[in-house]
Amino acid sequence: MMENFELEAYHVPPELRDQVKISRTMVYEDESTRILLKIPSIDRTLIQSLPHHLKKKRSYLAHLPIEKIVHVLDEASRRWLDKNYPLRKLALKTIPLITGFSPEVVEASIDVEMESSLREDMWRTLSLEIGNPLYLDDFQYSPQLGGYSRAFGPELIVSIFSENIPALPHLLFMRSALVKSACLGKVARGEPTFAPLYLKTIEEIDPEMAKCMAVLYWQGGEEEIEASLFEQASAVVLFGGVEACRSLMEKIPRRIRTLVHGHRLGFGVIGRQRMNRQGLERLAEAVALDCSMFDQQACLAPHVYYLEEGGEVSPKEFCQAVAVAMKALNERMPRGRISPGEASAIHQLRAAYEFRELNGEDVLVLASSPKTDWTVVYEKDPGIFSPSPLNRFIRIFGVEDIFQVPPALKPIGPFLQNAAVAIGDDREKEFIRILGGLGVARITSPGKMSVPSMMWHHDGISPLASLLRWCDMEKKDEF
């Protein structure tokens, strides 16, 4: 029996819903599910009235104790972690059909995002970035200043979302609420549904807080819409590729505080001390998970894993174990739908490696057949960083010494983000210092690349503290 669902690619406060007109309805269907996705028509009246309304309603958020804000956001995360929560069930039935991700990948994405967005994570993040979270409520004594300080968030944050991680947009709404800012987001064409569903959850828990938040959809490059919104923003947060972010930044007035989370690259390094038989299966499974989560679409995912020679297990043997793990993981969490162009890129790169292997080069190709579900290729380190075509295609380079790796990474330093490191001897500290100097923003263990804590400095910045304006009171003798 066919299941029918109606979804909206937007969410605005109740007072403004009559202003939203539907321009068209997009239809997604397979043999069992039919989705009608309503796309809003964005006119000049809405673009002028919505930011003004959000700023006005933000007064509720500005006076809400930070403890209450954390409670609401924690409750939202816990609802989305509940497998029986109706909106979670709706997301798992509809997002895979719209995006092409498998239901298992979407479910894993929701769990990863929400498990790192609970009460304890928020308090720890606030303490890490701000010191005393109560600075957001009122002036508090600062021992370092010897006076009193208070932190103020932007009046309105405008954000452009990307489509590579289904549940990611909630993070921006959560960060905005934590700094007591109204927020207006634009959903991506490839994933327009999770953010509106998340705002419905906030509305269920605290309708007044939800009135400070909105989500719209419009075709990228709409000059009038984007210019108007950026002009009314107090801060802008961008997610997306290099060219998209560069184009958007040209439209943002220089006075507007702007945070950019653009294209980033990840990699992993395993030293010879960790290349042993005893931990082989578990470590290979960890590498396979890094390469498979979010179908390798996230900036957190590795393009390359470097394996040091001289261990009990050779790099080629390790590749065999990774291939077994990739196959098993694909059975439990299938890779999603990809375009003909993406499939062609994988086939062409596989063929190039296979040709080299047949010519007697020190190359190994291990891959799913006949489909492109996963691919593991091995070669000796070519000395340059070679990006993956993604969709669970991992390059594994064999190196004689781990310290050969940093020179290959130096040219892409501005784009480095996430690294998994498992060296297992006293060289690890020095190696990590070098990576930090090159520009790596986060260093973790194999198997943990896709699950950063909320405390990490996203792309090397403090995502909450970077949005704040401070007022210091140095009238300590009178106050």
Image (tube, helix red, strand yellow):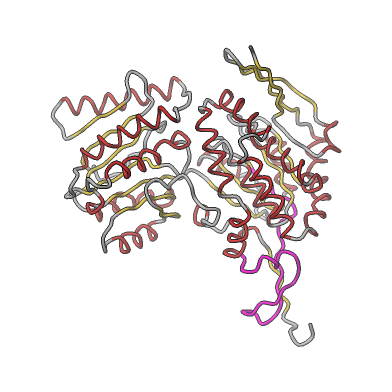
Residue at image point 39% right, 45% down:
447
Q: Give the quadrant of residue 45.
A: top right
Q: Is residue 43 left or right of residue 243?
A: right
- How far from the left and from the top, in percent, is residue 359? 14, 26
Q: Where is residue 87 in the image (x, y as percent from the top left)?
A: 67, 33
Residue 138 belongs to the span the image colors magenta: yes
Q: Which stretch appears magenta?
A: 130-159
Tally of marks: 0
Percent x, y of residue 131: 61, 68
Q: Who is closer to the viewer here, 445 or 382?
A: 445
458 vs 77, nearest the viewer: 77
Query: Residue 244 colored magenta?
Result: no
Specify whether 391 is left or right of 77: left
Q: In which quarter of the image is residue 92?
A: top right
Residue 420, placed above or below residue 96: below
- The furthest residue to the bottom: 477
The residue shown at (68%, 32%) is: 86
Q: In this view, does 132 lie to the left or right of 311?
A: right
Q: Is residue 390 above or below residue 280?
A: above
Please identify the residue farthest to the front as the structure is shown.
84
Question: Quick one: quadrant of the C terminus?
Answer: bottom right
Instruction: Please state, as top left, top right, bottom left or bottom right, where the N terminus lies in the image.
Output: top right
**Which residue is painted at 85% across and 31% down in the image?**
18
Residue drawn at point x = 70 percent, y = 73 percent: 149
Above or below, comparing residue 255 to residue 291 in the picture: below
